Image: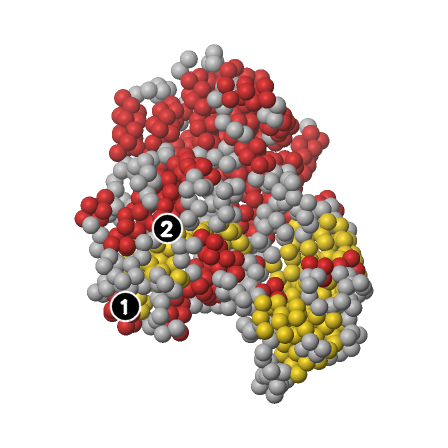
Amino acid sequence: MDEERRAAGGFAIALAVFYGALGALVLLGARDVLFQYEENRCGMTYMFEYPEYLKIKLPKKVSKRYAAYELYLYGEGIYAEENRKLMLSGIPVLFLPGNAGSFKQARSLGSIALRKAEDIDLKYHFDVFSVNFNEELVAFYGGSLQRQTRFVHECIKEILKLYKGRVFAPRSVAIVGHSMGGLVARALFTLKNFKSELLNVLVTQATPHVAPVMPLDQYLTDFYRTVNQNWIRKAKEIRNLTTLSVAGGFRDYQVRSSLAFLPKSSHQYCALSVVSSSVPRVWVSTDHLSIVWCKELILATVRAFFDLIDEDTKQITEDPQKRMLVLKHHFLNHPAKVFEERPELITELTEPGRWLQIKSSKWSYAGYNQSDGKYFTFDLSSHRKLYSHIYCQNSMLDTNSWIYGCINRTSSTCLQAVDLTWKAELLPTVKTVTLKLQDYPSLTHLALHVPAVNGNKFTLDCEFFNEASRTFHLPVTQLFTLGLSSSKITLNSTGFLHNVQLQHFGQTHQAFKILIESRCQSVKERKPSIYRLRIPWSHEDSLTLSQVPSLTEISAKLHVAQPENDTTVPVLNIYSSPDCQYEVTVKTSFLQVLGQVIRFHGGALPVYIISNILLAYGKQLRSLISTGKCLDFIPALTKAAKPYKVEPIVNVAKFLLGVNWFKGMWDMLFLPELDAVTLSHQNVWFPLISLSLFMFGTAIAYWSGILFNSSLKLLSSLHLVLTRPSGLPSDNSLITRRRLCVAASMILLSWTTCGSLVITITYFHYIFKMIKLQSIARTELSVLNMSSNSVEQNSNYSKKDIGKNCGSTEELSQSSTSSTAVDGIIDSLKMHVTILNLLTWIVLLCCPSLIYWLKNLRYHIRLDPDPCRTLAVILISVLGILMNTNTSKLKSSRLLKIALRLPLPFSVAVVAFAPLHLYRAPYLIIIPLSFHALCHTV
């Protein structure tokens, strides 16, 4: 016996260590997502005058219908005073806040737009309006999204009415939407009476366009489906709209950037999605809130808005092609030039200056206090045979043209030239141009212009090179190397630009550390090196500046996976110092891999936890039949929670859905699409992801079960201290008049207020009953122990004293009866604890609608629509039976053999159909619980 106990104890410790390790992996992944990112490098936006918000009076009909919502006009100082008369003459921009967002978040946009207008003497200005959505939690409750959309439509109509009779009255509104506000703006096109010409420009900031972050109710997922299907179906009709979506990057752990990329359509030409880290003159990642006030990003947005203005109409241009050119200029490829719609590419170089010819293939020039201008020319004809490309960089970050291609040349000067500055690209410390020589056969020379400058130190560098000699191939390490091995390459070239292709890098579950070590031949002052990780299939580049010599670490991970038919490769561009040698090392970062798993799939963890608890619940039902005893939750979980019971079924179904006959049968049964199929279409599914999530779910279920058991024991101890425990329950009736009245009142309460409120009340009532039952069990156990000790003492009396102690036989019989009753209570408690574990997740998944209802209680007593009302009615009926049951009657039920077969298929179903539809999980829990309740009546 002692050996068996030691073996069992050792096994329990081994399990605790194993599940502890799995839990630690989850925590490490969550830590990587929540804390391991670059510091906030955004500049703060400041108001130069006190911000004011003028409430716009809406028609009584609108105000009554949307009592919780308001419309404001932003202003500062004198401008705010002038706005009080509502004699508006600017260009209307409407700001829509997101989940729990404030209308006051418009102040950064409004203030910078006002300062920019003052810089041009108020030739043009923007009137920034903002909607107050009462800080509603629309990311977790989708019932009010349609109402918000209709209110925004009313606001647009009222805004345009304010400009009636003006000389340059606007016919449309531009919208800036933060978070869910951007989705509400896109939803305008789903309204039957919305005219598409009312909205011409839409800028969204950290908006989850693809899918909700947490799909907690059907109204939310239905809203997304309607908006995205309409976006694709009516792409031709909404071509007048120009849309820009800006994602925050890895700092935004609330909305991952892949969700912010707009759905693509073959007819959708005027939509652009970028990550803030790749935006020129921004180059920083933003969190979910700072994207609204990040100075660099707001400046880029305001500059784009001013470039969108048509000088004839004094409003935003109606030309969608020009609007797209402006957005690409400011958010994709900035050539360090002021935007021009039709730039003059052919120009005459009339500015005076000396002409100097450069014959070497690699050249550098440092200037300071230039009293006169210079032109440096390179003969292209002599270099075409030896080199394929030319690269030039200029540290003078002005907006003047500086590089030209000669097409008409005299013996020493260019008469006419092509302005190649528009081919340039702005980087943090230089502006660069890379030209493929064979693409410019008509150019005879390249000319670099250096103007007369005073007090500005600058450098100019050029080199001819062959692309093959500057392109290096570096295969990334495999996932299972866990960072123990690495790939390394040394760049022996002494050029200004190197391209390292990262081969086999294209999945979101991959994550690497890239170490770049620079070693220089001499100690002198150098410009910082620039390392850019370019992802060719999406605009999510990241830039890192590094002093040389140094050792720099770069994180390489993706927001968007490589499309199936895409053959491009991520490239690490190294803008280097020519006298330094660079060594690039790539190795897998296991902690960041965990972070990517949590970032992309952490929202599905509740599903896998529920699946594990259902398996444990099924094991407990089986143990009642096989042994007559109910297993504890933890032993039941460790014996039943096996991935092979769930994962193969889901994977086989996913595979068979690719076969036409099986897909036809699936559709005939009206079964929803597997969530794993949807994730595969989004290129974020990996064969081992589901297995990993299942094991993580087992670990979380294990430790949460221990925590729940410990909490229940602690509360029962507190209950014993505060109250006098009653004896064993004598009334075994399932249905009484009092319970029927309570159930009826709860159903009425759910129908008139909020279903989630009733679910929460019932849940805590159930917990309180279990605390009382645990207290009774502990009291009876202590009494039973005292009785058994007394019987043992009596049994030690001599035979001649038996006559005097004839009551000992009765005591023994009573002790046996009490022991059986206490065992029954303990068995019942074990089953109730598992049911409460399942109910805990139902309550957690329903909580957002309760929070929304409490926040809006002053406007509406009844939550409408209510995603939990039907669930609440079912749950009240089921729990009304379950919380008053025991296992003794369950063991004799004729339906138990059917009930014990249900947890396994529903644990599979919850993994198959709930990761992207979390609101389905409570219904998949309630079905086996309903059969359990039915077992006590049949």
Q: Which residue is mark 2?
A: 199
Neighbourhood count class around disc 2 (C-alpha, 10 Å): few under 14, some 14–19, many 20 upward: many
Counting every numbered tag in the picture gives 2
Q: Which residue is mark 1?
A: 80
In this rendered view, identify the residue nearer to me: 198 or 218. 198
Which image quarter is the N terminus in? top right
Task: Write down the quadrant of residue 363 in the picture.
Answer: bottom right
* Residue 809 falls left or right of residue 93: right
Against 833, residue 111 (above or below) is: below
Name the residue type under label 2.
Answer: Leu
Please state the horizontal and vertical placement of residue 403, each as a whole percent of the image. 63, 71
Q: Residue at x 25, y 46 (%)?
A: 66
In this rendered view, identify the residue nearer to me: 754 or 308. 308
- Is residue 860 in view? yes
Task: Write down the quadrant of residue 690 in the picture.
Answer: top right
In this rendered view, identify the residue nearer to me: 661 or 342. 342
Neighbourhood count class around disc 1 (C-alpha, 10 Å): few under 14, some 14–19, many 20 upward: some
* Residue 785 falls left or right of residue 127: right
Badge 2 vs badge 1, beta-carbon distance below 8 Å: no
Please state the horizontal and vertical placement of residue 531, each as a whole percent of the image. 66, 63
- Is residue 376 in view? no
Secondary element type, mark 2:
strand
Return the residue found at the far left: 60
Q: Residue at x 47, y 57 (%)?
A: 322
Please state the horizontal and vertical placement of residue 306, each as a whole percent of the image. 42, 64
Name the residue type under label 1.
Answer: Ala
